[in-house]
Amino acid sequence: MPESLASWQTSLEKSKTFITDLNKRFLNFKGDNPNEVSFIDGGYADSLELYYDGYTNVYNAISPQLDAVLQDVRDGISYYLDCLNSSTTCASSTTTNGRSLVYSASNKTVSISGTLTLSYDALDTGSIVENSITTYLAFDVYTEGFLALNATATTDATNVTFDTSTNSIDVEERPHFRLIYNSHYEVPPAFSTDEAGGIDVAWPSVKLNVAINDEPHEVEVLFETSLFGVSDPYDSAVEVHYNPTAVVFWLRSSGENLGEISNSTGGTSTLQNYTSLIMEASTVNGNVYYADSKWPEFSNLFIKRPESALVTNVSDLATFYRSTEQVTTDTGATDSTSDDTVETAEYIDIAIAGGSIGRYRIFPYNASLDASNLQICTMSDTADITAREELACGSITRVGGITNLDDFLQLQFEGGVLDYHEVAAQGGYKITLPTDADGLLIPFAEDVEVAFDGVLENTYQLGIGALYLTATANYVTDVENRELTPTILDTSLIRKVKDYFEVTTVFGYDYDYILSNIPTGANAQSFNISYLVEYSETSNVNIEVGSLVVLRSGVTLFGAAESIGLLSTSRVEYSVGDTNTACGAYNRDELVAGDDCEAVAYLRYRGSLMATIREERPGVYIVRYVDGTWIMLGES
């Protein structure tokens, strides 16, 4: 061996030893086999699993009552709105689960079981005053106090308490439901009169005390969500269904205080069992998808609406009307209109059956800038199309290369925007617009209303815009020696459609701090794994890209304890086919790959490429080192 290659040979042999050892540790991750090495200590894994089993047991015992609490709050709000709109005395009632409901006409509040109080405030945003009466678009219904949970065979009686506290953006907030309507009301209407177009829930602090494996714990939950109400414009018989557009859920659980310990920052921390769960999520199509259930359920994700409920052909789906108007673009420096700037703008109104009316304004061309100004507005629906009024308008923006309305419409047509329109609860419809022999859009005549039929092309699915989940556990492993072992699992997911997604997961055990998204420390055992599945329109193939970073501290394979990292990257390409071929890591059971599978992973040890991994037979992965030797991945 030449001296120049000796260090490389040493690194190669060490990488083989490390990878073989790491393979064994991943196979025996939690130390289920006490005779083999593991990634985390087997005794710790058993203790932590027992600890979380305690949470599971408590949740299973009280979850029926927690569901009942939610139902009781909904029943209470429904009763409250009925009473606010009643012209007669509102009699006492009960919830579905038997809790008492009592309305106070003098205080305009409702008491549930005498312990939880409902009250309301109107929001000034969007309010209007007519004949000295103020009406509103939104109302906050506050839920303050507590509801009791009965003892079960395995849990003691406790209370679910709703408190004022700081919310997810660190602003103090009272616990409430925000009801947002499409029409103005003096008081929030009864559900039977008008269902809210949107519902925001903000519970910044919900507390209860429970015993986890006989150890008292205080559990605090923060819960926030925004629900969007979707109705079917083509079927007035169906009721409003609600989809989540955003969800925030934080849980913190603290056990008994067993004293203080020194931490890695030089300060002190409480020696106690502590668990936290932080989940934040947003959805795709939450404002247009019509779900099977009235309230959100996980089963609604990635499911299309039944074909029987869809309208595939809509007569006069889109109506176009082109004209000109005088628009005040600058109100001047005085209250007089004499110094206002008024411009003549071309516009086109596009009215969608079952949707809104959008107005696109193009202002006079500025030759020196080679641009025209554009403004988009939402208009009211009136019998006289020339008398439409603005409901809302965006800011005026400059668009380069546009000389008039026809230029703008041609660009929109070429971009597939002008002839494709979406309808809530249904999907995207295609219309056929008139074109000339060169395929250019024929200009619309002025002051003439033209309607076009639509054909359903795409339907909605509820997807995951983004999901962030972090679970941490600080578990007391030795009270006498003041030992507290932290564990973290951090996951992010983007999955707008079922078959394509991006996911990243970080795991850390016995770490001191997190550096560059890797849990690190003198004894840290951690990894960061990410995977992306996407479709390339350029090459017409599915692409899967993955990476794995492993950090193991305190490694003694080569003498003194040291920290060693490993990096693996992978890339898979295949066309979608039906040749019964499994390729990559996703959808293997569906055998969707064609016969052009290209898949390889690369292993790097301390910055140098040491090996490749390929699936050389179905389900058999071979690690081939650069010196020609190999091992089978997954064998202990």
Image (cartoon, rainbow, N blue to C red):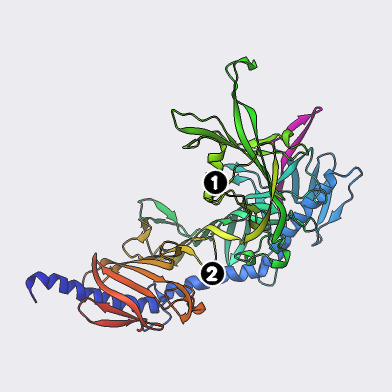
In what quadrant of the picture does the C terminus appear? bottom left
Q: Quadrant of residue 432?
A: bottom right
Whether residue 283 is visible, yes or no, is yes
Q: Residue furthest front?
A: 437
Q: Earlier in the sequence, mark 1 or mark 2?
A: 2
In the image, 84: left or right of 177? right
In the image, 454: left or right of 609? right
What element does badge 1 sit on? helix
Which label sits in the foreground, 1 or 2? 1
Observer-nearest of 542 and 327: 327
How many numbered discs sit on the rendered protein? 2
Task: Report the amino acid beneath label 1.
Answer: Gln
Label 2 sits on residue: 52
What element does badge 2 sit on? helix
x then y, percent, for residue 419: 60, 51
The residue lying at 79 percent from left, 40 percent from top is 187
In the image, 633: left or right of 557? right
Mark drawn on residue 412: 1
In what quadrant of the picture does the N terminus appear? bottom left
Q: Which residues are magenta?
A: 126-146
Q: Residues within 10 Å of mark 1 (few under 14, many from 20)?
A: few
x then y, percent, for residue 23: 34, 77
The residue lying at 41 percent from left, 84 percent from top is 618
